[in-house]
Image (spheres, rainbow, N blue to C red):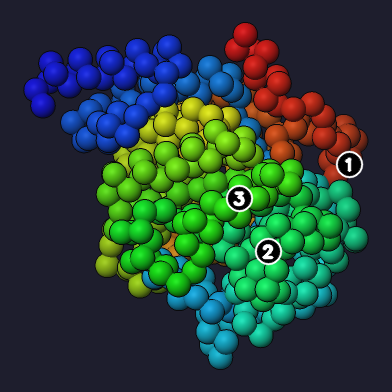
Amino acid sequence: MQANERDARFREIRDKVESEQRLSMEDGLFLYEPEVSIQQVGELANYVRERKNGNVGYYNINTHLNPTNVCVYRCRFCAFRKDLRDENGYAMTDEQILHRGAEATANGCTEMHIVGGLHHQRKYEWYRDIISMLKENYPKIHLKAWTAVEIDWFRFQTKKSFEWVLDDMRSAGLGSMPGGGAEIFHPEVRDQLCEHKANTPAWLEIHRTAHQIGLKTNCTMLYGHVEKAYHRIDHLMRLRELQDKTNGFQVFIPLAFHPDNTKLSDLKKPSGLMDLRTMAISRLMLDNIQHIKAYWIMLGIETAQTALAYGADDIDGTVRHELIYHDAGAKTPEFMSVDQIKDLIREAGRDPIERDTTYNRVIRDENDFTVWQSGESVDADAQLAGA
């Protein structure tokens, strides 16, 4: 394609975006072409980002809990899982789990992000009890727990339906679901990465069911390994299609693949330019998902900060005790303080706002940081700002 043709094609896409028309598969593929200016793609994504969310950068105060790293699956991209007899394999005790809840409370966390391995010697009740135990002892903390892969495993264990499992977990204290396990939906890629775990129809059905019973969820895409641009756009369009039907996804998180210590260690991690282009294209394609998150643990602090000008409006949070991506070679710190996060957002020219898991503004006691309550929806504020 000649430069003048490329410019004309980009103007067509820009006109569609500005008039709030939906982008097509062909549009998305065009934006991934290396000859298309990443600055122009980013500028267009930033236009949508500010139209949807104003000039703010959201963050939360959260901690991670990975109850076990023992897992029946052997996904090629995973550096976290261990075999049962591996000397580095573990399963946390009740005391360790409760200690993590106490630590989260003492540090003012509003959320615990709970995911882990599928331990074949731990029954469903062990996983359920983790939720009920934490909710009983620390009722204010929102428990965002269990990817669709884990819910699929719980269905296998219990021989019940997805709806039964999700209802049972919600009755135990589950507040929402993370978006992990999506990887890449297209079977050409998924079969290479994780052929035995929850497939694409199961992942989508689990999230559809969660939305139908009133649970909000996140959604993700793992990119930068063996997939091509077509597979990424296909993935985004499948998420967009489900969101059209349920409106249950809160935020999309593009996850950059880290190859160290995985079975794909011969691959290079995606470049910062690929990270930013994928962030921007995600913002442009997912017109019906309110938030796009730049997960600083995976992207690195500098790229995540830059992503706030490439479509992202959220940078995640303090992220205590993250293991999964650090095991895969992430060089980012294992924790960021609230002041560091605020400074990062301000340096990017955005206004930092603390939100809870379901995107309500967090109001903290001026005299005691650990005392907080959830206020109004930040989305309502953003809509008023853009009106």
Label 2 to label 1: alpha-carbon separation? 39 Å
For image coordinates 61% across by 70% down, the residue present is 153
The residue tagged 1 is: 371
Q: Which residue was labeled with disc 2?
A: 161
SS category of the residue bearing label 1: loop
Determine whether 134 is above or below 337 in the image: below
**Which quadrant, please, contains the C terminus?**
top right
Q: Nearer the viewer, mark 2 or mark 3?
A: 2
- Mark in front: 2 vs 1: 2
Q: Earlier in the sequence, mark 2 or mark 3?
A: 2
Q: Tell me the residue at 66%/85% (across/down).
A: 121
Q: Which quadrant of the structure image shows residue 345?
A: top right
- Residue 20, quarter of the rendered image: top left
Q: Residue furthest bottom?
A: 85
What residue is pinned by disc 3?
207
- Neighbor class of circle 1 (other Cα within 10 Å; few <14, some 14-19, many 20+) is some
